[in-house]
Image (cartoon, helix red, strand yellow):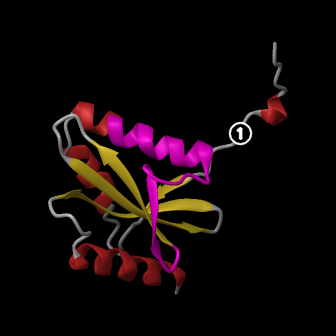
Amino acid sequence: MVHFSKTDVPKPIPLRFWRSSTGQEPVRDWLNELSREDQRVVGRDLAKVQFGWPVGLPLCRPLGGGLWEARSRLRSRREARVLFVFYEGMLIALHAFIKKTQKTPPDDLALARARMKELRS
């Protein structure tokens, strides 16, 4: 039998949502628009990243320059993506969308990169 002390329990990486200068949190808003079931799938996948980092494919994929995507397969046969970065010891969810094409749309990448740049400035 394996016994763990309290210090052996992995500490999660804190998750924060990117917030605009006007206080909007687009990823949180996007999540709230999903069905309860889809919210649970995305939430579970983000928790796997928080508690199990580093995590590779099929859950996480690097997009370059410190940007990552968490990949969730929803029960509705759709693919959800949450683009995130690690910043000051936290996982910051920058952008999220339902994937409709094979490649990540350039506009979605550009938006996440712009938010990442704003975060670091």
Q: Residue at x 53, y 82 (%)?
A: 120
Return the residue nearer the eye: 90 or 104. Answer: 104
Residue 34, how many percent across, how many down? 20, 43
Q: Residue at x 65, y 62 (%)?
A: 89
Q: Is residue 49 left or right of residue 6?
A: left
Which quadrant holds residue 91?
bottom right
Q: Residues within 10 Å of mark 1 (few under 14, many from 20)?
A: few
Residue 103, how many percent across, how many down? 24, 69
Element type at marker 1?
loop
Q: Is residue 63 magenta?
A: yes
Please determine whether, in this image, residue 85 is positioned above or below residue 30: below
Q: Is residue 92 left or right of residue 74?
A: right
Which quadrant holds residue 37?
top left
Q: Which residues are magenta?
A: 41-66
Residue carrying label 1: 10
Please determine whether, in this image, residue 16 is positioned above or below residue 11: below
Residue 75, how many percent across, how many down? 22, 34
Return the residue nearer the eye: 58 or 75. Answer: 58
Q: Is residue 54 left or right of residue 99?
A: right
Q: Residue at x 31, y 64 (%)?
A: 24
Please determine whether, in this image, residue 76 is positioned above or below residue 79: above
Please determine whether, in this image, residue 114 is positioned above or below residue 86: below
Q: Residue furthest bottom?
A: 121
Q: Residue at x 29, y 43 (%)?
A: 73
Q: Is residue 54 magenta?
A: yes
Residue type at tag 1:
Pro
